């Protein structure tokens, strides 16, 4: 099939490569010239394991091309996937202006038989407005469907090619059939296909992310209790996770969730529920957000407890991306902790295997790529992102002034670090040193 993918950020670039890998002829459309150039040269403009080589592979087949505007070839595509971003406004609402302008632009070129499939995360009720606007511009009833994406950074390509489910919300069976055809190779492997009404499909993504955020904040609330009661939140998560109804996944306590999805999606969801007159239904998500943010403050508190005054103290923060295997710094908990410690007067050195290059404005933070140099004379080390490099770190090899580490992700082998002479502080754990 001939397809277009409009907007080539994390979601769009991955989706374009995935669809070309499935054998489709894909045209990626992106206005940002530097992104476009990079993609044409086979370079993904962000860090995502395996995506560069997959891009090179599909570019060589000629099945994936890139351009900045619609033309007659792209207009004749059978499906146009909308993958532009919906960032958070200051008010907490989702900013849908990029989706609105991308769909309006597309409507001018659209063919009546083409299907428009939105993948961006939008507030429930947006697709109906978009369909109306597009149909007015196009002069015919546009086939619009909503097809949310659930990929995680770090495993994006795998998540796109082997998703847990494919969800399509639509007003017409024609769009459903076209999308089934596009995803046929995935569906053949037994992946569930859910054909829903549009409003439910719009809700699936934010509801899933709200649930995941709630699960993380639940265990982080238990970590607060464990800290006060002398218990261990990691052992608690293990014990409750054995109950299959609860499960162990997404029960890792620590400095909490960040990134471009979970924080903004729960805030956007709260704002939309308020607009719908059912704000109180999502009041609990405000607590989920607050618990999450409190974990960052807790690390700052622990650092102050450990160091006394922060002036003239050197803190090494290991990891600045919001999660490992990504260079995404959006709402990164560890980066926020680093900045707050720096504002409080500490000299903060930041290390990350990949993400330092993505930090365009370090301010007073001191990026250092060489771990040995970064660690020199440190009074405190904070593990903020659980990159494999840090999980596997030999404590004896980390030469610092004072052997104290705060494990912000509860991933270190505490005994091993203690045997090497380190004091280990962890969230929710009451470790005896
Ligand atoms: C998330 C959803 O998982 C994905 O389905 C959706 O499409 C986009 O948003 P992503 O933001 O890539 O994906 O990362 P995810 O793996 O969900 O982690 C989000 C944050 O939660 C990270 O900061 C991670 O460190 C944190 N986290 C995750 C925890 O603190 N504890 C956990 O147990 C799991």
Image (cartoon, grey):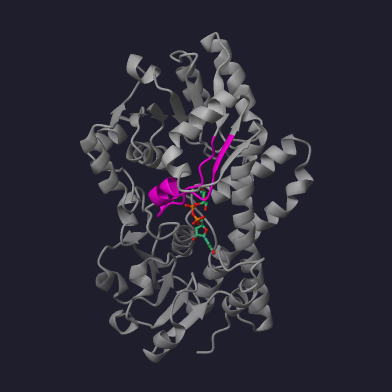
Q: How many marks?
A: 0
Position in image of residue 184 (x %, y %):
45, 38
Residue at position x 40%, y 51% in the image:
158
Query: Is residue 267 found left or right of 53 in the rendered image?
Result: right
Per the image, is 92 magenta? Answer: no
For the point 48% across and 58% down, the residue is 336
The stretch in magenta equals: 147-168
- Nearest the viewer among 227 and 200 is 200
- Residue 211 in view, yes or no: yes
Task: Indicate whether 220 appears above or below 171.
Answer: below
Which percent across, then down, holds residue 166?
53, 42
In the figure, residue 290 lies in which quadrant? bottom right
Of all residues, the one furthest to the top in this rendering is 139
Quadrant (top left, top right, bottom left, bottom right) of the N terminus: top left
Q: Classify residue 9 as left or right of residue 397.
A: right
Placement of 341 over or under 309, stated as above or below = above
The location of residue 180, given as percent across then percent down, is: 50, 34
Residue at 54% from the left image edge and 89% from the top image edge: 432
Establish if 72 lies above or below 203: above
Taking the magenta stretch, the answer to whether it contains residue 163 is yes
Residue 197, position in %: x, y?
66, 33
Q: Nearer the viewer, residue 178 or 84?
A: 178
């Amino acid at each position: 099939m001939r397809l277009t993918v409009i907007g080539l950020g994390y979601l769009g670039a991955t989706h374009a490569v995935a669809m070309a890998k499935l054998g489709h002829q894909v045209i990626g459309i992106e206005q940002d010239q530097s992104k476009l150039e990079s993609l044409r040269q086979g370079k993904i403009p962000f860090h995502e394991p395996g995506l560069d080589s997959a891009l090179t592979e599909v570019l060589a087949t000629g099945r994936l091309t890139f351009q900045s505007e619609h033309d007659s070839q792209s207009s004749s595509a059978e499906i146009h996937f909308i993958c532009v971003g919906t960032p958070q406004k200051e008010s907490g609402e989702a900013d849908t202006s990029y989706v609105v302008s991308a769909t309006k632009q597309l409507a001018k070129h659209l063919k009546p038989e083409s299907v428009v499939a939105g993948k961006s995360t939008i507030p429930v009720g947006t697709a109906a407005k978009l369909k109306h606007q597009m149909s007015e511009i196009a002069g015919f009833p546009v086939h619009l469907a909503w097809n949310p994406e659930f990929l995680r950074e770090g495993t994006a390509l795998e998540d796109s090619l082997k998703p847990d489910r494919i969800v399509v919300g639509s007003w017409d069976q024609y769009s459903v059939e076209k999308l089934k055809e596009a995803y046929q190779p995935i569906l053949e492997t037994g992946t569930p296909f859910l054909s829903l009404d549009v409003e439910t499909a719009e809700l699936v993504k934010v509801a899933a992310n709200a649930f995941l955020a709630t699960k993380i904040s639940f265990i982080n609330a238990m970590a607060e209790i464990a800290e006060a009661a002398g218990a261990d939140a990691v052992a608690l998560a293990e014990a409750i996770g054995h109950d299959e109804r609860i499960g162990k996944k997404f029960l890792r306590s620590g400095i909490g969730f960040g990134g471009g999805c979970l924080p903004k999606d729960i805030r956007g969801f709260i704002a939309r529920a308020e607009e719908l007159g059912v704000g109180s239904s999502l009041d609990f998500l405000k607590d989920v957000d607050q618990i999450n943010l409190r974990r960052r403050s807790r690390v700052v508190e622990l650092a102050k407890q450990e160091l006394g005054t922060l002036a003239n103290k050197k803190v090494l923060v290991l990891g600045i991306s919001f999660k490992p295997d990504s260079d995404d710094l959006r709402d990164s908990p560890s980066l926020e902790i680093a900045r707050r410690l720096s504002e409080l007067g500490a000299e903060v050195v930041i290390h990350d295997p990949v993400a330092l290059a993505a930090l365009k404005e370090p301010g007073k933070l001191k990026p250092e790529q060489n771990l040995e140099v970064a660690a020199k004379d440190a009074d405190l080390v904070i593990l903020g992102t659980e990159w494999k490099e840090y999980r596997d770190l030999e404590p004896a090899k980390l030469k610092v002034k004072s052997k104290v580490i705060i494990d912000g992700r509860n991933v270190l082998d505490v005994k091993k670090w203690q045997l090497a002479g380190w004091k280990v502080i962890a969230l929710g754990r009451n470790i005896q040193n």
